[in-house]
Amino acid sequence: MSATLTIRDALQGVNAYPVPEAALLSTATRRGLSLDTAATADVLSGRDYRLATADVLAWLAGAPDVSQGGQSYSFTDAMRAAFRSRAAAIYAAEGEDDTASGTTYGYKGSLL
């Protein structure tokens, strides 16, 4: 009997950080995915899964440093910037607005 990779497994595999189940569930729900769905090649290459991956990367960019079961998880500023950059690239490739990532552009005043 072979194990079947699910959407949950695939999203958790984006990084070793222990992303809470609630964050994964809300991401999957927002993207129209079920965490228990088999992660087939078609699903993993689909727009909804790619956007869910970007959502997880954006979430990781703001994730707190944690210690769990004797294991510590922390990210440097460069790692957080890389997560944001990867997420923004996926959003752009999929034609999605990435302002939810916290980056806003526009007129900031003449005295900057």
Image (spheres, grey):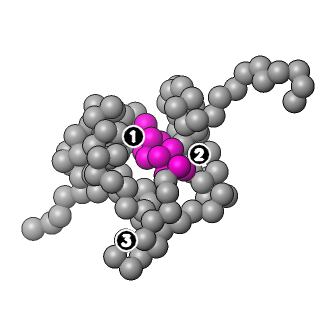
Residue pictured at 51% horizontal, 27% vertical: 96
Crowd tier of the residue under label 3, counting other residues whose Cα lies within 10 Å: few below 14, some 14–19, many 20 or above: few
Q: In the rendered view, would you say 110 is above or below 1?
A: above
Q: Say which quadrant the C terminus sits in.
A: top right
Residue at image mark 2: 84
Q: Say which quadrant the N terminus sits in.
A: bottom left
The image position of residue 12, as x and y in percent, is 35, 57
Q: In the rendered view, would you say 84 is above or below 5?
A: above
Of callouts 1 and 3, which one flags the residue occurring earlier in the amino acid sequence?
A: 1
**Residue 42 visible in this rendered orientation of the protein:** no
Q: In the rendered view, would you say 5 is above or below 73?
A: above
Residue pictured at 43% horizontal, 71% vertical: 67
Query: Left or right: 15 with respect to 87?
Result: left
Closest to the camera, between mark 3 and mark 2, is 3
Residue at image mark 3: 68
In the structure shown, which secondary structural element does the residue marked by tag 3 occupy? strand
Closest to the camera, between mark 1 and mark 3, is 3
Residue at image mark 1: 52
Of callouts 2 and 1, which one flags the residue occurring earlier in the amino acid sequence?
A: 1
- Please report the bounds of the magenta region as a residue range: 50-62
Q: Which amino acid type corresponds to the residue marked 1 in the rendered image?
A: Ala
